[in-house]
Structure formats: structure tokens, C-alpha cells
Image (tube, rainbow, N blue to C red):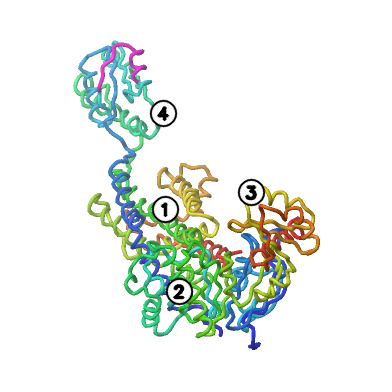
């Protein structure tokens, strides 16, 4: 009376059932497809880590021609929009405190005269630096903008003011994304973020739902093997994952014109390892969770560090050592390097292989835990 | 195969932590028998059934189920047993036909399509086969569940409160069907129920409380074994009367049955002297033979004294 350990018929039956259930659950299905689209539009179009045209106030106590050059230079940098003119420093501080302006540019009395005399007069810029990202690039750009503007004036009689060139000719080549377009970084990264979230969530939910609705009892009373149930449940969601990947790649190409330098086939192949790692996490969670709400909570418990420590939101190298260690464990960290590497840098297998095995290792451990934890009885 | 018994187990025990839910139950069910399994809520009936079909690991016990070792060969048992859970446990977001087809696939049934079609037809569900299971009424859900349990032609059916929440007519139809299956297909049934009329339709009964099997046998054996004497009384103010009677030595129980009161005890003379002061107008007394319900309430009361603490 012994039956084979793994039956293709039962396996196919479970896959079929999952597909039918997915088809019936319209809302979840819509979420699976809608989530990437909405996140792409929000993150892709809304997030910019290099904000320009920041509101600035001007406290002007001198209006010589050199001042106008300096101001023009500041405007030309593209970071500053002078929206207010204030009369006193106090007035400027109030605007900063209220958040009406990001900067107050203060040009003192006798600026022009001091400049012509070569006394190196000061220009004071007060910045609202509560959000360092918002002000960082603007403050980096302004020094150069002022130098440049005066360089044009420093012809003829004012030639002595021209800044001597430095002892070294520093040349910077920004590779892969020379125009520093945030979307080139964010949109490929979103692929990993969306896969992490949906893959863990839907597998976690699909198994806890069986337990919550009592159908698990029936499934266990039938001669099904854990491997048939687990793999049978995973396969449909791998397909779902690929649908999401394709949606994002199409949007990246046609909405955001993200360059695709590398081999897309390689990317899709590596994505399978990443999807498997996340599905395994989802199953592990589902074996721990008693109901669907707990499965959701666990998903977010895993998702938040993934999004924060992987280098998706904040520069990975900016984190302290211990945070980088946590980040190195998470599959998303490595997947981000792979996606960005393949799409933006045109990396091949040789450049990314050291990012693949950590994901594979993670997936392996998660599968081992999932299979061990999946009980064939109700105990 | 050890001939006559479909279920033959001894000392089945299950503990959850320090709490013993099933305490050394011995049970024998003959082939082709409809065996009623009774007992109050939480008495361990469901746990016992789950151990039989391998859903729970028994902490102790041995024996056979359909000739297979009940502890080690649960995979083989699963192939020959149909288990109908207390709560509807098929997929509410799948249609009737899809549910049956899924079950048929899980059991690897040959001629799957034909079997599913025949099963739908047999149950009179033909017109509604594409209806979602979740939209069915209680009675239809129960029919569907039974059809699904029968699809792999099991030899033993374990039905856990199959008629809870089902209307009286559907319950009667259901029992007709069970007796027909038992007679024609030689199917064995182990059925839990709270309904006495259903218990009386079983070939044999077992009564379980606090994880212990208190009694088993045919209906008349169970009643005779209890040694319970019952008097029935009618008249006005029965509620007050029952309060007074319960205080009397010799009266072990005074239970309302519709507009009558059943007063019972095991010591015949003690009982008669206890009720003697109340045998006057306007009360009308009559000695009756104890019913199953009298006996079960009596067993419950004894079990409370013996095991509850």
C-alpha cells in the first residue's frame, strides 16, 4: 500500500488549485500587478535625491555689479530660487524656522568694495539642514558657482582677482550615471524591493490561509507530501514574480529610459535565485504565523530592514560596520548590486558572481528551515 | 488483515502539555458497522479521530486501523480513510466540481473525470457543479464534504459532527445515506454527534468524557449497563420541584425533558423514598425506562466526580 514519495499528479493538482484561487481572488491579483506599477510611478517620478530650485531668501545690503554677478552665478547653479527678499537677519531666520525657505543668502554691506580691494569678503549662507540630503548638493555646488561667476568679471582691471589654478588638475569622471539621475538608481532597485515584499507576503498568506480556514486539516488528512504542497504553492508565485519583473523592466525602459547595458537573460536567470530566497522566507514565516495578520506583520519585520539596510534608500557605504553586516545577510542587498550592475554597468556573470552565492546560501538555509518547520501533523 | 475489526486500538493517549486530552482509550469497531461516538464538547472525540487518521501523533497506544499499524502506517491509512472535519474544510473559493477534482487528484484516482462526474451526479449536485463551495448552504456543504470524502472509495469514514447546524430533514436524508452506504458498500463509519436520535440509529455507541471512554455497546447494552432508574413527572411548577428534588439523597439527577421532568438514581429504593413526599397532586408520576439522554447525563455527572479534578 506504499505510495511514491513525490507524485507529479498531486503536484500538478496543487499548482492548478493555486492558480484557480489566485484567479478568484481578484483583489490580491490586482495588488500583485498594481503594486509594482504604483510603486514605480511614486518612486520613479516622485523621488529625487538631488533636488533643485530650492526656495531661498536674499538679504542684500550691497548692490554693486559684482554682487549681481555673484547672485547670477548662484541662480545659474540651478539649486537656488530666490523667492523672498528680507531686510534683516531676524526676518531671514524666521523664514528658515517656518520652513518657508531652505536658505538665506546674506551679502553684507561694502561687499563690492571689499572684493575689489582683495579683502576676500564673506557671503553668509544659512541653510535649513534638518534634511541633509535636501541641502547637501546645493551647498556643494555654490562655491564653484560663485568662483565661476567672478572669474568672468575678473578680466581687465580686476584680473588679479582671478583664482589661480590649483597645483593639481583634478578630473572627475562620474561613470555609469554621469548625470546623476536618481531614477537610474531607484527604478532597477525597485525591482528587488517589490519582489521582496510581494513574494514573502503572498506565500506567507497562502499557507497561513489554509491553516486559518481549516483547509490545512483536510490537506494533511489526504496523502499529500510536504514537498508537493510547498513546491506546488511556490511555482505559481514564481510566475507572478516574473510578471512583476517584466512590468518593471518595461516601465524602466519606456517610461524612465533607464539604460540597459548588460544581458537581460542573465538578469532574469539570477532573479530566479532571488525569488526563490524570498519565497522560502515567506514559507518559513507561514510555518511560524498562526494567522494571516501575523504573517503580514512578519513580512514587514523582514521588509523594513531590507529596504533600509540594503542600500536601496540610503548609501550602503554610509552605514556603520554592524549595519553593513546585517545588510550583507539580506538577499536584497546583493540583488540590488546585481540589478544595478547588469543594467547600468553592463556587468556580466564574472562581475556579479560574488553577489549570487550569498543569495543562494540564504535561500538554502531558508528552505531547510521551511521544510523542517512544515509539520505534517497538526501537533 | 485481522478479520472482523476496521478499528482495533488500545491505550490511545494524547497530551497537550500537561493536559491529557485522550486518556488510554481502547476502541473496537467492526467492519460495516456504524459506530456512534458521543461525549460533551472538549471531551477528546476530535483528538481521537485525528490520531486515527495520522493528523496527530499519539503519545501512547497501539493497534490497527484497516489492518495497518495506527502509529507507523498512517500514510497507508490515509489512502483508505475518508475524514470529514467538524468545520467545512474544502475550498470555499473553488467550485463544487473543482473541489472534487482537486481531491481526486490528491488521491491519484484513475478515470478522474469520470469519477468526479459520477460523484456529482450521485449527490444530485449536477446543476450546481460550477457554483462556488462558499456560496452553498450548510446542508449542501455537508453533502459536498461527504461526496469529497467518498471519492477515493475509502473503507472507513471518520465523520466529526457531520450534522451540526443542518436542518432536521437534511439530517434524516444524511443518515439514510449513511446506512445505505454501510449496507451496500460495506463501509465502516465512526461518527461523532450530539443528537440522541442519531445516536439511536448507530449500531453501537461509545461515550467519552474528559478523555476517558466511559461506556460502549449497543443502545440497550449502554442503557442496561448504567443501572439507572428513571421516573417521569409532569404537573405545574416543575422547575421548583426539580430544585427541591436535587437536594434529596437518592436523587442523582432531575432533568427537564420538554414539559416533563426525568428524575433518576441508581439505588431504586433510595430513589423511591426520596420522591415519596412529592407523589401527590398536582404531580403525576410514572416509572419509565431510561433513555440514552438520561444515561449520558448520568455518565457525565459521574465523570465530573471521577476525572474533573
Label 4 vs label 3: CA separation?
Answer: 82 Å
Please give the label number shown on residue B237: 3
Q: Label 4: few (<14), some or many (≥20) within 10 Å?
A: few
Q: Is residue B260 left or right of residue A147?
A: right
Q: Residue under circle 1?
A: A197
Q: Chain of mark 4?
A: A
The one nearer the camera, A314 or A23, is A23
- Front label number (4 vs 3): 3
Label 4 vs label 2: CA separation?
Answer: 65 Å
Where is residue A117, by image quadrant? top left
Which secondary structure, mark 3?
loop
Percent of width and height locating residue A317: 46, 45
Which secondary structure, mark 1?
helix
Q: Chain of mark 3?
A: B
Q: Residue under circle 2?
A: B148
Label 1 vs label 2: CA separation?
Answer: 36 Å
Q: Residue at x 47, y 48 (%)?
A: A300
Q: Is residue B262 above or below residue A77?
A: below
Q: Chain of mark 2?
A: B
Q: Residue at x 50, y 81 (%)?
A: B181
Q: Which residues are magenta?
A: A83-95
Percent of width and height locating residue A313: 40, 44
Q: Which label's residue is closer to the chain start, 1 or 4?
A: 4
Q: Residue under circle 4?
A: A130
The one nearer the camera, B140 or A89, is B140
Amino acid at each position: 500500500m506504499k505510495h511514491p514519495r513525490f507524485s507529479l499528479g498531486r503536484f500538478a493538482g496543487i499548482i492548478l488549485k493555486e492558480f484557480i484561487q489566485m484567479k478568484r481572488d481578484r483583489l490580491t491579483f490586482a495588488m500583485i500587478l498594481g503594486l509594482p506599477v504604483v510603486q514605480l510611478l511614486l518612486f520613479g517620478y516622485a523621488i529625487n535625491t538631488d533636488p533643485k530650485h530650492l526656495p531661498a531668501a536674499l538679504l542684500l545690503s550691497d548692490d554693486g555689479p559684482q554682487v549681481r554677478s555673484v547672485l547670477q552665478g548662484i541662480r545659474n547653479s540651478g539649486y537656488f530660487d530666490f523667492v523672498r527678499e528680507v531686510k534683516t537677519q531676524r526676518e531671514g531666520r524666521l523664514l528658515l524656522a517656518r520652513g518657508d525657505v531652505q536658505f538665506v543668502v546674506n551679502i553684507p554691506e561694502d561687499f563690492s568694495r571689499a572684493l575689489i580691494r582683495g579683502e576676500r569678503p564673506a557671503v553668509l549662507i544659512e541653510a535649513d539642514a534638518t534634511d541633509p540630503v535636501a541641502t547637501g548638493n546645493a551647498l556643494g555646488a555654490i562655491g564653484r558657482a560663485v568662483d565661476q561667476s567672478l572669474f568672468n568679471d575678473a578680466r581687465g582691471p580686476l584680473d588679479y582677482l582671478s583664482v589661480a589654478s590649483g597645483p593639481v588638475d583634478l578630473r572627475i569622471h562620474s561613470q555609469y550615471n554621469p548625470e546623476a539621475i536618481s531614477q537610474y538608481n531607484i527604478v532597477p532597485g525597485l525591482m528587488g524591493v517589490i519582489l521582496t515584499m510581494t513574494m514573502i507576503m503572498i506565500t506567507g498568506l497562502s499557507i497561513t490561509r489554509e491553516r486559518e480556514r481549516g483547509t490545512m486539516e483536510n490537506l494533511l488528512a489526504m496523502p499529500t507530501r510536504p514537498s508537493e504542497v510547498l513546491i506546488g504553492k511556490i511555482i505559481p508565485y514564481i510566475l507572478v514574480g516574473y510578471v512583476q519583473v517584466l512590468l518593471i523592466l518595461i516601465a524602466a525602459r519606456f517610461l524612465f529610459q533607464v539604460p540597459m547595458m548588460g544581458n537581460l537573460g542573465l538578469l532574469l536567470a539570477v532573479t530566479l535565485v532571488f525569488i526563490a530566497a524570498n519565497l522560502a522566507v515567506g514559507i518559513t514565516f507561514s510555518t511560524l504565523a498562526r494567522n494571516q495578520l501575523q504573517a503580514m506583520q512578519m513580512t514587514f519585520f523582514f521588509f523594513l530592514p531590507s529596504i533600509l539596510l540594503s542600500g536601496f534608500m540610503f548609501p550602503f557605504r554610509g552605514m556603520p560596520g554592524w549595519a553593513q553586516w546585517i545588510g550583507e545577510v539580506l538577499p536584497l542587498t546583493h540583488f540590488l548590486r546585481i540589478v544595478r550592475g547588469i543594467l547600468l554597468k553592463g556587468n556580466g556573470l564574472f562581475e556579479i558572481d560574488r553577489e549570487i552565492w550569498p543569495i543562494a546560501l540564504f535561500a538554502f538555509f531558508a528552505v531547510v528551515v521551511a521544510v523542517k518547520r512544515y509539520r505534517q501533523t497538526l501537533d | 488483515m485481522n478479520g472482523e475489526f476496521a478499528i482495533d486500538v488500545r491505550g490511545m493517549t494524547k497530551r497537550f502539555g500537561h493536559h491529557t486530552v485522550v486518556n488510554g482509550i481502547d476502541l473496537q469497531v467492526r467492519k460495516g458497522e456504524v459506530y456512534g461516538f458521543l461525549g460533551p464538547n472538549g471531551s477528546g472525540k476530535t483528538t481521537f479521530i485525528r490520531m486515527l487518521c495520522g493528523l496527530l501523533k499519539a503519545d501512547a497506544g497501539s493497534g490497527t486501523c484497516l489492518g495497518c499499524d495506527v502509529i507507523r502506517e498512517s500514510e497507508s491509512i490515509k489512502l483508505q480513510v475518508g475524514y470529514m472535519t467538524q468545520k467545512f474544510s474544502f475550498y470555499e473559493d473553488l467550485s463544487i466540481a473543482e473541489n472534487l477534482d482537486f481531491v481526486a487528484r490528491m488521491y491519484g484516482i484513475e478515470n478522474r473525470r469520470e469519477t468526479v462526474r459520477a460523484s456529482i451526479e450521485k449527490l444530485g449536485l449536477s446543476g450546481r457543479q460550477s457554483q462556488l463551495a462558499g456560496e452553498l448552504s450548510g446542508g449542501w456543504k455537508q453533502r459536498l464534504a461527504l461526496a469529497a470524502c467518498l471519492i477515493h472509495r475509502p473503507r472507513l469514514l471518520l465523520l466529526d459532527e457531520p450534522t451540526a447546524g443542518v436542518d432536521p430533514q437534511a439530517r434524516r436524508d444524511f443518515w439514510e445515506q449513511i446506512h445505505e452506504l454501510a449496507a451496500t458498500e460495506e463501509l465502516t463509519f465512526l461518527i461523532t454527534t450530539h443528537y440522541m436520535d442519531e445516536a439511536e440509529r448507530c449500531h453501537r455507541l461509545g461515550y467519552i468524557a474528559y478523555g476517558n471512554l466511559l461506556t460502549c455497546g449497543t443502545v440497550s447494552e449502554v442503557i442496561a449497563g448504567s443501572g439507572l432508574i428513571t421516573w417521569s413527572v409532569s404537573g405545574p411548577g416543575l422547575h421548583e420541584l426539580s430544585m427541591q428534588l436535587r437536594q434529596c439523597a437518592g436523587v442523582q439527577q432531575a432533568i427537564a425533558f420538554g414539559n416533563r421532568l426525568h428524575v433518576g438514581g441508581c439505588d431504586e429504593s433510595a430513589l423511591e423514598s426520596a420522591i415519596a413526599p412529592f407523589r401527590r397532586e398536582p404531580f403525576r408520576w410514572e416509572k419509565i425506562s431510561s433513555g440514552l439522554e438520561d444515561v449520558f447525563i448520568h455518565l457525565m455527572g459521574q465523570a465530573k466526580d471521577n476525572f474533573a479534578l
